[in-house]
Image: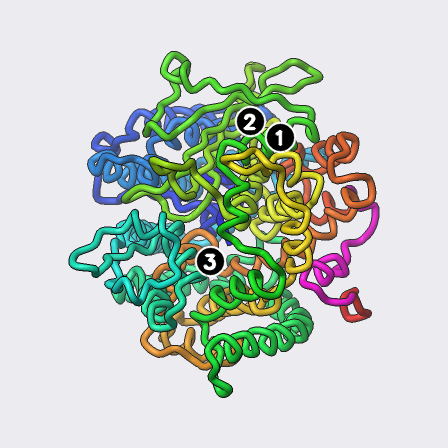
């Protein structure tokens, strides 16, 4: 699964970790790379505080706080983003320092007595508010409480120190993942079956390959290496990225989060984190898993039978057991042998240029948009281009003829770059109090296979799905019509934010959509019907095993944050849950959570991927009924969901869009299960 990274939501959920922002207590603001931004924000706070109580209004207090937080985000985001994409080590270090400083400034501002009293003096007038204004005020008051404003000054200072340490350690945790350059030594014999273009990218000495663990290397080798020893070595190395250093860091962070939660009156960090989300309580999440897991297990049992039979037939060993490192290989094997789907042949129909054209064509038609490549004009427009691979686009509304926002594409891997796939909201839509409009800016950062000398970048079908997923986040950021920056775009409940992007994955499974752009990179031949038919039949291949893996990640994350004192032997718990939840024997000496980046920013929230998938598939029903390429359906969805951001509760948006209560039937169908009464 892939993260949607937002530097927005600076009020809503900030302290809970939707975004990690901090400033170093032992460094003066003047030494900060974002000193100007801090100075401007301090001046804005002073102006709000200086308003006499008798003259307080929504605009000069609540609206002004949204102004200052959105402005501060805009002033600092681009520099904070550079740690994930810059090729310059000094710039990355400066960026990490900027993120730490920006974060702690916001943590501190939510603990200011004078600002809190200014807001309270306005609320004491008992203003008659509704809609987005009421939500903004309610959320702000909630975040003041969650920031510790009910504590005495000494306790607030102690809490501030704890939160600063959490942020500092979290940044170190993420840096360790980005900087991990683990190589697995494999012989040519062990790499039998590996794609030629993958091997050509690896360094080698005397027939020994130094194999990296980046996405375009690890996943094809996991799927195609014939030798189980190679797959096992790759798996073990992949599940040890981040190292023991990150195990120690996350265990220290868990203790600090527990102290934070206890000081604020919560039983556990999970209770603190989930309060602001759709689920509201950790118990609701546990009940969700209790309901979903037996349903998933039905499909998993069928998957295991199918995969074990494949392994025994392939190896000739009648007693062969299925191991975790076998799962991608035998899925690929079954695709090829049972469903006549050769993933390498599939890639030939997905050259990057065609995929971009197809994605752009579908979304422009569906949502009434137009994209314009302005990369050549970026410098003149004051937009940095941090690498030659990067492109910049404007998004225009076809009806109003107005420019809505901009987005970057940074699609290929390189050293020290963020190594997953994600969307960053670098600027939020905001109508300033003088009536001027700030338009949103997004960045898609991915790690797809780079073009080679003899062929273009060729994407797997999974990578095409990932691209559509992340672009779903991008559209959520760009087409918002919310006027308040802290509620615009993807600034929604963390366990709903993935739903729009997950829903959009369905487009790459539609025959009409695929045949509109999937064409052979050499001949231009349209995607073959027989290949497409095999893919459609195999869509649910291994879906139970994959869903169970998601349950494992989510439940481990939830348990880590459900221990009141935060003292967790994370390796022991990860091993225990693996045995209880997944359909495999345990694998000693692994610690997947050392590179589980979702523990920073998504803590106690990984459940949101499966939770939101239920809603994503339910929302998709309307497109299936009206037509997946029907602009009327697209505009209805754009207006009812995408444009509204966090201006209303996510469940209210869902009910309004669906015209009924959400259901689980479509999710079960997505897994390849028959809907039942248990799904209601």
Q: Secondary structure at mark 1?
A: loop
The residue under label 1 is 480
Looking at the image, the residue that sits furthest to the left is 206
- Where does residue 68 sit, x and y in percent of width and height? 46, 28
The crowd level at tag 3 (other Cα within 10 Å; few <14, some 14-19, many 20+) is many
Identify the image quadrant of residue 416: top left
Q: Do residues under tags 1 and 2 come within 8 Å of each other at their CB atoms?
A: yes
The residue under label 3 is 603
Marks 1 and 2, Cα distance to the nearest angstrom?
7 Å
Q: Do residues under tags 3 and 1 come within 8 Å of each other at their CB atoms?
A: no
Q: Secondary structure at mark 3?
A: loop
- Along the line of sight, the residue nearer the viewer: 23 or 511: 511
- Where does residue 541 sit, x and y in percent of width and height? 62, 64
Q: Any magenta on residue 62?
A: no
Colour pattern: rainbow
Work out whether mark 2 precedes mark 3 in sequence or the reverse, and give the earlier one: 2
Marks 3 and 1, Cα distance to the nearest angstrom?
26 Å
- The quadrant of the rendering that contains the C terminus is bottom right
Looking at the image, the residue that sits furthest to the bottom is 319
- Along the line of sight, the residue nearer the viewer: 340 or 375: 340
Q: What residue span does the magenta drawing correspond to?
A: 656-674
């Amino acid at each position: 699964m892939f993260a949607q990274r937002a530097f927005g939501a600076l009020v809503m959920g900030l302290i809970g970790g939707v975004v990690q922002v901090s400033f170093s207590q032992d460094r003066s603001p003047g030494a900060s790379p974002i000193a100007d931004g801090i100075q401007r924000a301090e001046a804005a706070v002073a102006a709000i505080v200086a308003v006499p109580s008798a003259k307080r209004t929504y605009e000069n207090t609540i609206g002004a706080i949204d102004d200052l937080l959105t402005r501060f985000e805009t002033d600092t985001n681009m520099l904070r983003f550079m740690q994930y994409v810059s090729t310059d080590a000094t710039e990355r270090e400066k960026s990490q320092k900027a993120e730490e400083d920006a974060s702690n400034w916001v943590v501190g501002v939510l603990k200011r007595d004078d600002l809190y009293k200014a807001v309270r003096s306005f609320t004491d007038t008992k203003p008659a508010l509704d809609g987005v204004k009421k939500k903004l005020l309610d959320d702000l008051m909630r975040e003041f409480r969650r920031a510790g404003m009910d504590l005495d000054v000494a306790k607030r200072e102690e809490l501030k120190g704890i939160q600063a340490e959490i942020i500092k350690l979290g940044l170190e945790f993420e840096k360790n993942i980005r900087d991990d350059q683990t190589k697995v030594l494999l012989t040519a014999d062990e790499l039998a079956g590996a794609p030629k273009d993958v091997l050509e990218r690896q360094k080698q000495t005397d027939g020994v390959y130094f194999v990296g663990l980046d996405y375009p290397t690890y996943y094809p080798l996991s799927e195609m290496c014939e030798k189980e020893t190679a797959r096992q070595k790759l798996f073990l190395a992949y599940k040890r990225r981040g190292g023991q250093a990150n195990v120690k860091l996350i265990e220290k962070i868990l203790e600090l989060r527990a102290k934070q939660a206890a000081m604020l009156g919560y039983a556990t960090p999970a209770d603190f984190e989930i309060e602001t989300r759709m689920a509201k309580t950790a118990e609701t999440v546990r009940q969700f898993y209790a309901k979903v897991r037996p349903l998933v297990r039905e499909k998993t049992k069928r998957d295991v039978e199918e995969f074990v039979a494949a392994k025994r037939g392939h190896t000739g060993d009648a007693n062969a057991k299925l191991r975790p490192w076998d799962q991608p290989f035998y899925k690929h094997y079954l695709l090829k042998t049972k469903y006549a789907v050769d993933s390498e042949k599939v890639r030939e129909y997905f050259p990057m240029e065609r995929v971009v054209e197809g994605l752009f064509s579908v979304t422009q038609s569906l949502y009434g948009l137009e994209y314009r490549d302005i990369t050549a004009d970026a410098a003149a427009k004051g937009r940095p281009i941090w690498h030659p691979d990067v492109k910049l686009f404007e998004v225009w509304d076809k009806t109003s003829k107005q420019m809505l926002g901009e987005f970057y594409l940074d699609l290929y891997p390189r050293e020290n770059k963020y190594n997953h796939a994600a969307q960053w909201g670098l600027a939020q839509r905001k109508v300033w109090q003088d009536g001027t409009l700030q338009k949103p800016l997004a960045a898609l950062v991915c790690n797809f296979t780079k073009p080679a000398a003899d062929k273009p970048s060729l994407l797997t079908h999974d990578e095409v799905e990932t691209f559509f997923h992340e672009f779903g986040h991008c559209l959520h950021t760009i087409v918002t019509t919310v006027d308040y920056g802290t509620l615009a775009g993807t600034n929604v409940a963390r366990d709903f934010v993935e739903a729009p992007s997950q829903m959009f994955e369905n487009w790459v499974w539609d025959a009409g959509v695929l045949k509109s752009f999937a064409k052979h990179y050499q001949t231009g031949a349209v995607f073959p019907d027989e290949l497409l038919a095999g893919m459609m039949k195999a869509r649910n291949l291994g879906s139970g095993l994959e869903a169970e893996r998601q349950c494992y990640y989510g439940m481990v994350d939830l348990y880590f944050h459900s221990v009141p004192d935060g003292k967790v032997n994370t390796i022991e718990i990860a091993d225990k849950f693996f045995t209880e939840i997944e359909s495999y024997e345990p694998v000693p000496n692994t610690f997947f959570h050392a590179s589980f980046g979702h523990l920073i920013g998504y803590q106690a929230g990984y459940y949101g991927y499966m939770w939101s998938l239920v809603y994503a598939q339910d929302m998709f029903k309307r497109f299936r009924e009206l037509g997946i390429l029907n602009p009327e359906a697209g505009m209805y969805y754009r207006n009812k969901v995408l444009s509204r951001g966090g201006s209303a509760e996510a469940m209210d948006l869902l009910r309004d869009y669906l015209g009924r209560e959400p259901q689980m039937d479509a999710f079960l169908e997505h897994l390849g299960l028959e809907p039942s009464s248990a799904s209601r």
